[in-house]
Amino acid sequence: MNSKSLKDILKTVLSLAMGLLIVWLLYRNTDVNTLWGIVKNAHLELILISLIFGLIGNIIRGLRWEVFINSLGYRPKRLSVIYATLGNYAVNFLLPRAGDVWRCAALTRYEGVPFAKAFETYLVDKVFDLLASVLLVILSMILYLDFFISYFRNNPDYGESIVRLFSSVWFYGILIGAIIIFFVVFKVFKNASPVKKMSNFFKGVVRDLKMVAHMKEKKRIVFYTILVWFSFYLYFYICFYAFDFTKGLGPLAGLIVFTMSNVGVAVPVQGGVGAWHFMVISSLVILGVGYQEAGAFAGAVFTIQSVWIILCGVVGIMALPYVKRAVPHPTVEVGLKK
């Protein structure tokens, strides 16, 4: 076993262990029989209906990524792009963020899109999701400011940690040091091969972002982004109606918990396990839901939706080689070469 394989295994085990530790801390004082009783009395068929919107959201994500790829002059098969997008999230359950690289490598292998270009367009695609996430947080804060005040009041450690972070001399020292190192590396060692590759890569991303600003399909990208996030909102909010204690909370409360759950997914653990549970449970408790009920909701929804994401991803991975292509593309070496 080489050092890279060992490093990947350690990364997988440690991230999963961290997520499972959070889950254990959240559920350690919860009676399993009580949880099962709550889940058993839920309308699980509604959670199953919600799964359709999760699949729709990821398909539209694939269509949006296709727009970026097409803008560079590449024309991969639409099904290949969609299958690669679905597979992305299944692979992420094995190794955090590995699916992002796999997605681009799959398009390189089966459609001949250079890996560097595929990855550049992927990053540009993620910028739109990041902007959408930030806008969701801002919108939620505007519409439901009392919730966020209550959240930090009920979780004072977070507020104190943020204040300590931004008032720490070490924080600013490390930040300034990192900026200096960045500029020194890219100025002093600008002719070194690794630095050249990274420099060219970042220039490519900036160039692609500028190109997006002048694309005719801007409206389509915005439209797809709205559809993606609306689909994922329904994917989450419909589950509220599966439980008696959440069905009366309303769509605004659903938006708040959905927004907080996305903050949890950003943590680099498999599928957001643990972090997602924490954000959902703590948010529901602040909205007046009992702790055990909130735990049952988070456990049931996360488990069912995760199995669905993995199943859809496995289907995408297995179907990818069988997409009908007019001309077979040779396998292109994966790398950051131009």
Image (cartoon, rainbow, N blue to C red):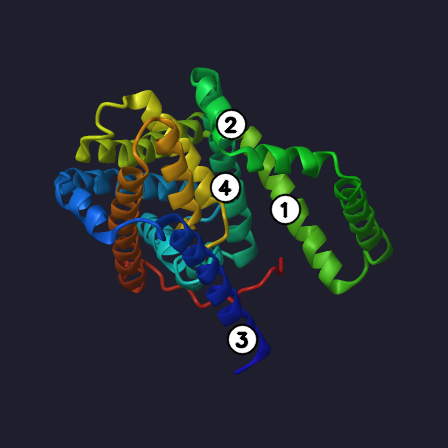
Question: Which one is nearer the viewer's eye here, 330 or 156?
Answer: 156
Q: Which residue is mark 4?
A: 126
Distance in Å between CA atoms under marks 2 and 3: 42 Å
Residue type, mark 3 in image: Leu
Residue type, mark 4 in image: Lys
Mark 3 or 4 closer to N-term?
A: 3
- Residue 327 shown left or right of residue 335 in the figure: left
Residue type, mark 2 in image: Arg
Residue at 18 percent across and 31 percent down: it is 244
Distance in Å between CA atoms under marks 2 and 1: 44 Å
Q: Nearer the viewer, mark 2 or mark 3?
A: 2
Q: Nearer the viewer, mark 2 or mark 1?
A: 2
Q: Which residue is mark 2?
A: 153
Q: Residues within 10 Å of mark 1 (few under 14, many from 20)?
A: some
Distance in Å between CA atoms under marks 1 and 4: 15 Å
Mark 2 or 3 closer to N-term?
A: 3
Q: Which residue is mark 1?
A: 204
